[in-house]
């Protein structure tokens, strides 16, 4: 299928209307492919009013086994996750949760301290930086084999997303893809073309500058933390930062491909089209993203974050129009890969692995639980969960189900057991992306040139991956 045949997919978000999602299938060279714009055709105020959230009158068994659990995310995630905890406790009165909730930075500050102390929560949320905490993760293989974790409704490709070196290191809580959320009205008024499947980073920069100049707002109100944006920029250009097979080598052969990304960040910063590092400190949550209040025309976010962003925007203006499209620069395969948004892992030192596994299985598979969660962490990996929320009253839930039906995925070797895959996430990824994030800030502040920043990133990444123990 030619890229031009995909067409421009956009989505208006209104409280009172819902439209169907359409898409065409394509098979990607690697794990899975995402062939549509990330289409969310209707997000209404689908809440959890019928479920107890932090209910002080909730009856706890004082002799119940206490399971500790923690996660990061928006207030919406906090509310829905707590509601699922209460539901599980009602069905399993011999188990009681002690939950902690943080913003992203606070969570990992706390987690790193706990790892050093050997006192991690029984169940804890992780993302793509899980290699940093691999020594604290209990592989789930035995718990899956014993059916403490039910994977019968989970496709191998989704299970593979959280498998490393043959070990299942967690169970994905949803799959998503990064993209650009935007305000179509601002685009039209500024006279710039809407995002489309073949738009480039040059198109993106032009749109951001034009919107910023015309509306006196930020052209793009947020980029992902750390070095995620650069790693995606390089991957979509077909030159990934990390080597796909050798953890002690970079995928890049020189620093030069990094320069263009840093030049883009420098240009956006010099023209006030992106928040400064200081401004970014006052945007701690997705609900406070400048796109929500109309102080920005775009936001670089993960698809599951669109739920919280749209709910916040609709609360301010019930007729607000928003849309979301693929990232620019689709030069490599013309598609954007799905990834696991977050996963729940079990602490290697827990005394309650069976109970922890039981809850994770419940969280991923249970119909009632997923009618509460409504895909807030991404598209559910369980077919049972996807079917359950599609049958509910929330238009977004139905859109999620249709969205998944329009995804085609294939692995390079289709018959390989995902538990036997030799691929290993690069252990240096977290450190390298943190360094990239710091360097990008220096470039935005004018303290480093794009070339100096590119050299620094390349040298640091080269040394960091070379130090990995195979």
Image: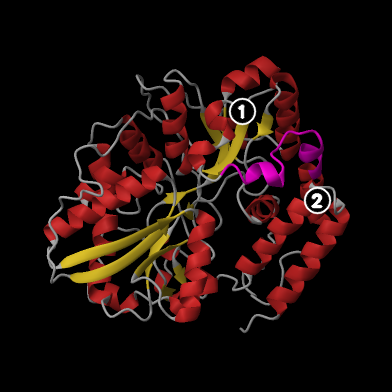
Start and end of the magenta stretch? 266-283
Label 1: few (<14), some or many (≥20) within 10 Å? Answer: some
- Front residue of 157/113: it is 113
Q: Which residue is mark 1?
A: 295
Where, quadrant-wise, is the N terminus in this rendering? top right
Residue 219 sits above or below residue 250 on the image: above
Q: Residue 208 placed where, x, y %?
A: 71, 31
> What quarter of the picture does the C terminus occupy?
bottom right
Q: Which mark is residue 422?
A: none
Asked if disc 1 and disc 2 are in contact, CB closer than 8 Å, the reply is no
Of residue 420 and residue 351, the one placed in the foreground of this image is 351
**Residue under the point 48% across and 53% down:** 103
Above or below: residue 343 compared with residue 425: above
Q: Which residue is mark 2?
A: 443
The answer to if 376 sits in the magenta stretch is no
Q: Position of residue 58 (x, y in %)?
A: 15, 52
Q: Position of residue 401 (x, y in %)?
A: 33, 40
Mark 2 falls on what kind of element? helix
Residue depicted at x 28% and y 76%: 353
Query: Which residue shows up at 56% across the image and 56% down it?
Result: 29
**Residue 22 seen in the current view:** no
């Amino acid at each position: 299928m030619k890229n031009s045949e995909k067409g421009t997919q956009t989505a208006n978000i209104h409280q009172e209307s819902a439209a169907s999602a359409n898409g065409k299938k394509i098979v990607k060279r690697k794990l899975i492919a995402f062939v549509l714009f990330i289409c969310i055709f209707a997000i209404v105020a689908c809440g959890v009013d019928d479920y107890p959230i932090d209910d002080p009158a909730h009856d706890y068994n004082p002799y119940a086994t206490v399971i500790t659990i923690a996660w990061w995310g928006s207030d919406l995630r906090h509310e829905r996750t707590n509601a699922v905890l209460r539901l599980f406790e009602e069905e399993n009165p011999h188990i009681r949760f002690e939950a902690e909730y943080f913003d992203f930075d606070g969570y990992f500050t706390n987690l790193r301290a706990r790892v050093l102390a050997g006192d991690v929560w029984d169940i804890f949320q992780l993302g793509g930086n899980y290699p940093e905490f691999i020594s604290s993760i209990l592989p789930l293989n035995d718990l899956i084999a014993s059916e403490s974790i039910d994977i019968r409704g989970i496709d191998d490709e989704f299970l593979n997303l959280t498998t490393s070196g043959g070990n299942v290191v967690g169970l994905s809580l949803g799959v998503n893809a990064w993209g650009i959320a935007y305000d179509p009205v601002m685009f039209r008024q500024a006279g710039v073309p809407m995002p489309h499947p073949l738009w480039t980073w040059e198109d993106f920069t032009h749109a951001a500058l034009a919107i910023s100049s015309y509306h006196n707002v930020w052209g793009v109100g947020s980029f992902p933390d750390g070095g995620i944006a650069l790693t995606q920029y390089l991957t979509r250009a077909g030159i990934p930062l990390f080597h796909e097979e050798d953890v002690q080598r970079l995928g890049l052969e020189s620093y030069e491909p990094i320069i263009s990304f840093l030049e883009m960040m420098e240009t956006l910063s010099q023209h006030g089209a992106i928040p400064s590092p200081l401004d970014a400190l006052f945007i701690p949550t997705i609900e406070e993203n400048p796109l929500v209040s109309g102080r920005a025309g775009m936001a670089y976010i993960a698809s599951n974050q669109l739920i919280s962003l749209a709910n916040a925007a609709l609360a301010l203006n019930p007729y607000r129009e928003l849309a979301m499209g693929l990232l620019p620069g689709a030069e490599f395969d013309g598609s954007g890969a799905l990834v696991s948004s977050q996963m729940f892992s079990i602490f290697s030192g827990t005394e309650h692995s069976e109970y922890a596994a039981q809850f994770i299985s419940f969280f991923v598979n249970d119909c009632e639980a997923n009618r509460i969660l409504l895909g807030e962490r991404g598209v559910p990996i369980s077919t049972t969960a996807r079917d359950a929320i599609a049958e509910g009253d929330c238009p977004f839930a139905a859109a999620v189900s249709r969205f998944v039906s329009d995804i085609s995925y294939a692995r390079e070797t289709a018959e390989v057991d995902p538990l036997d895959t030799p691929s290993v996430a690069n252990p240096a990824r977290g450190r390298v992306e943190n360094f990239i994030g710091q360097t990008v800030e220096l470039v935005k502040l004018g303290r480093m040139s794009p070339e100096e920043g590119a050299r620094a990133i390349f040298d640091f990444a080269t040394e960091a991956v070379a130090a990995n123990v195979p």
